[in-house]
Image (cartoon, rainbow, N blue to C red):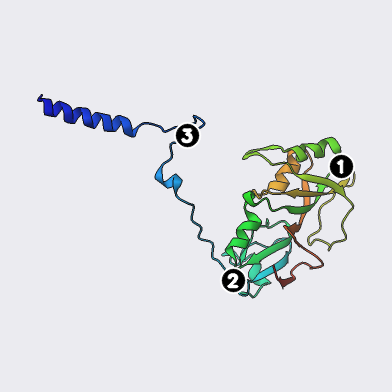
Amino acid sequence: MSSRSRRDSSSSTSRKQHSGFKRKNSSGETNKRSSHQRRKPQTNKPRISAQDRKVVVFNKPFDTLSQFTDGEGRKTLADYIPIKDIYAAGRLDRDSEGLMVLTNDGILQARLTQPSSKSPKTYWVQVDGAPNEADLDKLRKGVELKDGMTLPAKVEVMAEPSVWERNPPVRFRANIPTTWIAITIVEGRNRQVRRMTANIGFPTLRLIRYSMGDVTLGDLQPGEWKEITL
């Protein structure tokens, strides 16, 4: 090999070695990031002016889907809400009831639903049995579910709320008491509250979402909705 070839090979090797170097910051920590990590994240959420924003609060009845369409003939939001181009800020299970917020503002939608926003959601939950404070403390500290530990929750026993009768009614066992508890979480995993109460041995019989952020159910009855300003 000629001297020129050796120099070219050496130079190429040097460049390859240099490209693998990890630069350290002033604290001595490695700071190697790819170009896509350095880019600012982009959002596809539409920006809506305050005057064009639509916000609807809805009391979702039991056995209703949290969507506007369904190919199986089940009840959906379209059976109750005639407003177009609004979308649910977070789903509510078919067998759950209570507050839904719908909007055409994608930024507001994300703020109400993304765990990073820490927007609290409060549920009134009727459970099978009578959990004591030690049981509830497990929920307050976080429990291990199949998809990981839950974040700490605010949990309190509450008096039975004055709410509508569910249709169909909850099935009771004559020899087993039931308890109402208020659970506030900042997450929104699939069927999370039901899985949390089951984890501590007290299955959920009935679940009503009462609030999301600063928005509450108020006196809306099942199937009723109204527009609000946020």
Front-most of residues 228 and 61: 228
From where the camera sits, is residue 173 visible? no
Dots 2 and 1: beta carbons under 8 Å?
A: no
Displayed quadrant of residue 165: bottom right
Front-most of residues 190 and 3: 3
User: Which residue is the site of mark 3?
Assistant: 25
User: Which residue is the site of mark 2?
Assistant: 49
CA distance for labels 1 and 3: 55 Å
Q: Earlier in the sequence, mark 2 or mark 1?
A: 2
Task: Report crowding for label 2: few under 14, some 14 to 19, many 20 or more residues within 10 A (C-alpha).
Answer: few
Dots 1 and 3: beta carbons under 8 Å?
A: no
Name the side, left or right, on which 216 lies relative to 83. Answer: right
Front-most of residues 163 and 85: 85
Front-most of residues 212 and 5: 5
CA distance for labels 2 and 1: 48 Å
CA distance for labels 3 and 2: 42 Å
Residue in the image at 64% along x and 55% along y: 113
Q: Amino acid at mark 3?
A: Asn
Q: Amino acid at mark 2?
A: Ser
Secondary element at image label 1 = loop
User: Which residue is the site of mark 1?
Assistant: 130
Q: Position of residue 216 (x, y in %)?
A: 77, 62
